[in-house]
Image (spheres, rainbow, N blue to C red):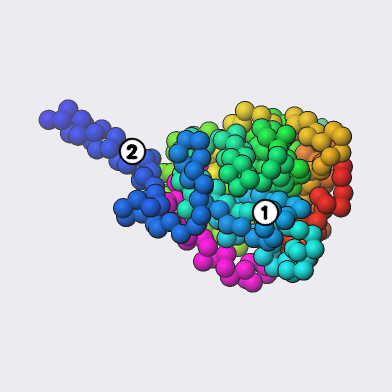
């Protein structure tokens, strides 16, 4: 009898563990029961679709073609203050922007095989489908800034310039001296330290960790006020469209968006950004990294370390700002103009 009870308990526990750790399948756009497709989309090499949104002057007349990569829990509609640039500036400079839903977000198909390399290739394919020519600019914010490191590694020959805006840092990149990354890691809220530990050491537990109710999971995903600086909170209070976009951003499910971002962002990488070579040795373009010195999500100490290791990076530290400074229209304009003013 005891044997049967034990067996039943073990079986029950196994079923529970399976259900708790296995995410439900994503609700794919355009499938029965899934969200509708409303955006233009391109079809990629493996059949996945990528949804995009264009702004600015036409591709044909543009002088600067910029591909914008959105951050965590965001989508193609989130484009910093790009849409607030005055039409005269956009026209005068000849700016064309295309923003896309990263795989799994908004109306882009999920990519369960996503890597830092695959997303760089997605960007290259998007550019080719849209006919942006042999070279284009990439610009990414936060988790999207981290994607730009992959572009510098895997498609440098396609870049006219690159801008990383408060790019998320992976504490496990080997280029960081242990004391520097430990000190920065300890500045994170304990619940975020645990979330990152799970994503790095036990990625298969990421879904369970972020959906269980016993311990607090990611404060960043929950948008707890503690992860923002004072200026961030002021800026977020103004950015009302951000909140409506958030639900649409994750309409296909949280696993292939938020959790996949954590697994990749803090997982083991096949390259270290601090080992990258200057993509523009003949000054034919430039790379810019922007960082707020009061950022509570991305430690400024690590960004300074990266900037020191890569002297070809134009490092811009925004004093008094946290993570959300690109929502300040003047700073957004400066970020966009920097690659045009300055060659490295
Ligand atoms: C890390 O260690 C190095 C060498 O011992 C030292 O120069 C540096 O100040 C330390 N940095 C931190 C943040 O503790």
Q: Position of residue 260 (x, y in %)?
A: 50, 42
User: At 31% from the left edge and 53% from the top edge, which residue is drawn?
Assistant: 32
What residue is disc 1 on? 59
Task: Determine if the C-beta at disc 2 is less than 8 A from ligand 1.
Answer: no
Q: Is residue 164 visible?
A: no
Region of the chain picked out in magenta, as a range:
232-260
Q: Quadrant of the C terminus?
A: top right
Main SS of the magenta segment?
helix
Q: Nearer the viewer, residue 314 or 255?
A: 314
User: At 65% from the left edge and 51% from the top edge, which residue is drawn?
Assistant: 68
Position of residue 226 in the picture relative to residue 281 (left or right): left
Give the class, few, some or many, for how many residues have Cα within 10 Å of label 1's Cα (few <14, many ≥20): many
Q: Nearer the viewer, residue 195 or 121?
A: 121
Position of residue 98 in the picture relative to residue 291 (left or right): left
Circles 2 and 1: CB distance less than 8 Å? no
**In 3D space, how far apart are the residues under numbered discs 2 and 1 (Cα atoms)?**
51 Å
């Amino acid at each position: 009898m005891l044997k049967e009870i034990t067996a039943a308990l073990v079986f029950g526990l196994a079923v529970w563990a399976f259900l708790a750790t296995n995410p439900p399948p994503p609700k794919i756009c355009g499938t029965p029961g899934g969200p509708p497709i409303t955006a233009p989309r391109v079809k990629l090499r493996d059949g996945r679709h990528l949804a995009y949104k264009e702004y600015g002057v036409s591709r044909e007349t543009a002088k600067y073609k910029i591909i914008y990569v959105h951050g965590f829990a965001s989508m193609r509609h989130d484009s910093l203050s790009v849409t607030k640039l005055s039409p005269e500036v956009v026209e005068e400079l000849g700016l064309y922007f295309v923003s896309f839903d990263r795989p799994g977000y908004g109306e882009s198909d999920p990519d369960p095989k996503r890597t830092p390399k695959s997303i760089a290739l997605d960007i290259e394919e998007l550019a080719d489908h849209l006919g942006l020519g042999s070279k284009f600019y990439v610009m990414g914010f936060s988790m999207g800034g981290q994607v730009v490191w992959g572009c510098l590694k895997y498609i440098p020959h396609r870049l006219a310039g690159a801008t990383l805006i408060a790019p998320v840092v992976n504490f496990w990149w080997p280029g960081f001296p242990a004391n520097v990354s430990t000190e920065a890691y300890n500045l994170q809220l304990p619940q975020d330290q645990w979330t990152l530990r799970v994503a790095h050491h036990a990625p298969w537990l990421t879904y369970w960790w972020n959906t269980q109710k016993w311990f607090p999971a990611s404060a960043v995903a929950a948008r707890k006020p503690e992860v923002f600086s004072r200026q961030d909170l002021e800026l977020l209070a103004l950015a009302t469209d951000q909140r409506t976009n958030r639900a649409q951003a994750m309409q296909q499910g949280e696993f292939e968006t938020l959790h996949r971002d954590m697994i990749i962002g803090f997982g083991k990488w096949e390259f270290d950004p601090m080992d990258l070579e200057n993509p523009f040795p003949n000054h034919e373009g430039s790379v810019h990294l922007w960082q707020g010195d009061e950022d509570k999500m991305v430690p400024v100490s690590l960004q300074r370390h990266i900037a020191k290791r890569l002297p070809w990076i134009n490092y811009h530290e925004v004093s008094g700002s946290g993570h959300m400074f690109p929502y300040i229209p003047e700073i957004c304009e400066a970020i966009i103009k920097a690659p045009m003013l300055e060659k490295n």
